[in-house]
Image (spheres, rainbow, N blue to C red):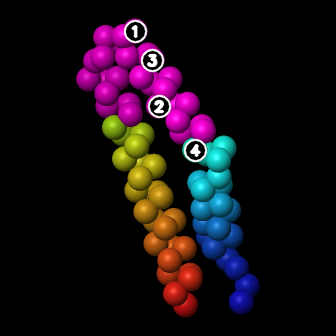
Amino acid sequence: MKKNFFDHFADQAAYFAGSPGAFIGASLLVIIWAVTGPFFKFSEVWQMVIITGTSIVTCLMVCLIQKSQYKDST
């Protein structure tokens, strides 16, 4: 069966998301965000940056996981 664009993209994104580099990158972003807290006086906007970012990433990862599980079950 030939893969369409989304299948190929989802496979590559899932592979990258599970890599050590992605984990290290995400960890560094959280550390940088935490370190900048005092500079922004731990403002609501500072908090909303991480909340919004993690919400978007979580939603996208759920879609990738569902795609991977669906593919594995068929």
> Badge 4, how many Cα within 10 Å: few under 14, some, many 20+?
few
As shown in the figure, which amino acid type bears the numbered disc 4? Phe
Is disc 1 in contact with disc 3, using a CB cutoff of under 8 Å? Answer: no
Query: At which x and y percent is residue 33?
Result: 45, 24
For marks 2 and 1 on the same chain, the one whose residue lies earlier in the sequence: 2
Q: Quadrant of residue 38?
A: top left
> Badge 1, how many Cα within 10 Å: few under 14, some, many 20+?
few
For marks 3 and 2 on the same chain, the one whose residue lies earlier in the sequence: 2
- For the residues labelled 3 and 2, the Cα–Cα distance comes to 9 Å
SS for tag 2?
A: helix
Query: For the stretch drawn in magenta, what is the main secondary structure?
Result: helix
- For the residues labelled 1 and 4, the Cα–Cα distance comes to 25 Å
Q: Which residue is mark 1?
A: 39
Query: At which x and y percent is residue 40?
Result: 36, 12
As shown in the figure, which amino acid type bears the numbered disc 3? Val
Q: Which residue is mark 4?
A: 23
Above-or-below relation of 47 to 74: above
SS for tag 4?
A: helix
Q: Is residue 54 magenta?
A: no
Q: Which span is picked out in magenta?
A: 24-50
Residue 35: which numbered mark, if any?
3
Kindly report which numbered mark, 1 or 3, lies closer to the viewer in this rendering. Answer: 3
